[in-house]
Image (spheres, helix red, strand yellow):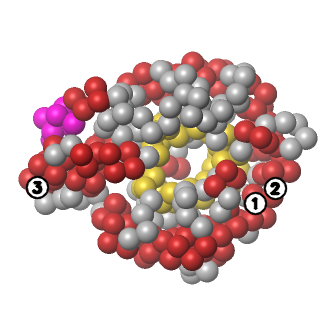
């Protein structure tokens, strides 16, 4: 089974942009709320602090799902594996549960970095491997290049952006999506529909958004520093949105709101 589809791992806690005491406190609050999946990245600059927070949480390593992501600056034969070893040292573990390529390379040729990713798995640095911010075309290339399963393509996924092409590619390639920016950094709250639907279920607007993502078959990552929000974001397994409510939310895809746009980052591709 894909690790992200296990019940306690469908709802992951993202650590960006947290650092220092704010990160430690948030991770411990997430542990108390029930989170066992945690997401970091070389780019975030907080792997060591995340590792320290998890090590001091009292939760056994075998109960955790830890994901980190390789920075595009390390997509060379000389730097890739050493950078992963440095990540493991920072996280205080001998392997990650999932190792992802954080972005496609700037030139769009994903094959070399995919082969380096596979070598990291073969070296035992990761139980599973995957990608992030890949287009549908890149997902098909990855499926052809990589031997064995890819655990995810982690992408911006929320009700305000139309990701049907990526969902179709996920079905075609067997590479599931997972979500970051799951509430569009608060942009969803400008749409009253979520609070309206939530009132009928006794849930908040944010919980409705997150439940919609899960019912799309997409595991998710959320981040908050407020214990009450951390708990609420985890507490989304005790209700199911009706097909009518799902369709009402689907209509907001036409909004076309994206947090990450091409040329905003040197690695951002032209989105589908």
Label disc, if present, on residue 85 of the rendered structure: 2
Q: Main secondary structure of the magenta part?
A: helix
CA distance separating discs 3 and 1: 44 Å
Q: Residue at x 41, y 39 (%)?
A: 157
The residues colored magenta run 242-249
Q: Is residue 129 visible?
A: no
Give residue 116's quadrant in the image.
Answer: top right
Q: Image check: 234 left or right of 173?
A: left
Label disc, if present, on residue 215 of the rendered structure: none
Residue 153: x and y in percent read 54, 36
CA distance separating discs 2 and 3: 48 Å
Figure check: 37 above or below 262? below
Proximity of marks 1 and 2: CB atoms separated by less than 8 Å: yes
Say whether residue 246 is magenta.
yes
Residue 152: x and y in percent read 55, 39
Say whether residue 255 is magenta.
no
The crowding category of the residue bearing disc 3, from other C-alpha atoms within 10 Å (few below 14, some 14 to 19, many at least 20), is few
Q: Point out the tag, 2 or 3, that comes first from the N-terminus.
A: 2
Residue placed under numbered mark 3 in the picture: 199
Residue 212: x and y in percent read 28, 43
Q: Residue at x 38, y 45 (%)?
A: 184
Q: Residue at x 50, y 37 (%)?
A: 260
Q: Residue at x 79, y 42 (%)?
A: 74
Residue placed under numbered mark 1 in the picture: 88
């Amino acid at each position: 089974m894909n690790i992200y589809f296990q019940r306690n791992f469908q709802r992951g806690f993202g650590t960006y942009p947290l650092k220092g005491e704010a990160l430690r406190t948030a991770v411990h609050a997430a542990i108390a709320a029930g989170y066992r999946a945690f997401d970091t990245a070389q780019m975030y600059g907080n792997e060591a602090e995340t590792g320290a927070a998890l090590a001091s949480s009292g939760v056994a390593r075998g109960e955790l799902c830890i994901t980190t992501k390789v920075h595009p600056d390390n997509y060379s034969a000389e730097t890739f594996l050493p950078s992963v070893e440095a990540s493991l040292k920072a996280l205080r573990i001998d392997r990650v549960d999932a190792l992802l390529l954080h972005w496609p390379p700037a030139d769009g040729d994903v094959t070399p970095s995919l082969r380096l990713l596979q070598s990291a798995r073969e070296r035992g640095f990761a139980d599973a491997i995957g990608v992030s911010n890949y287009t549908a075309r890149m997902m098909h290339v990855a499926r052809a290049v990589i031997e064995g399963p890819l655990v995810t393509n982690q992408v911006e996924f929320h009700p305000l952006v139309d990701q049907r092409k990526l969902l179709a590619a996920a079905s075609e390639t067997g590479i599931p999506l997972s979500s970051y920016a799951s509430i569009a950094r608060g942009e969803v709250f400008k749409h009253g529909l979520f609070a309206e639907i939530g009132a009928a279920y006794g849930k908040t607007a944010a919980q409705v958004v997150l439940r919609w993502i899960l019912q799309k078959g997409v595991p998710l990552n959320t981040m908050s520093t407020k214990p009450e929000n951390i708990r609420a974001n985890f507490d989304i397994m005790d209700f199911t949105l009706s097909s009518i409510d799902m369709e009402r939310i689907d209509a907001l895809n036409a909004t076309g709101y994206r947090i990450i746009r091409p040329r905003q980052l040197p690695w951002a591709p032209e989105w589908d």
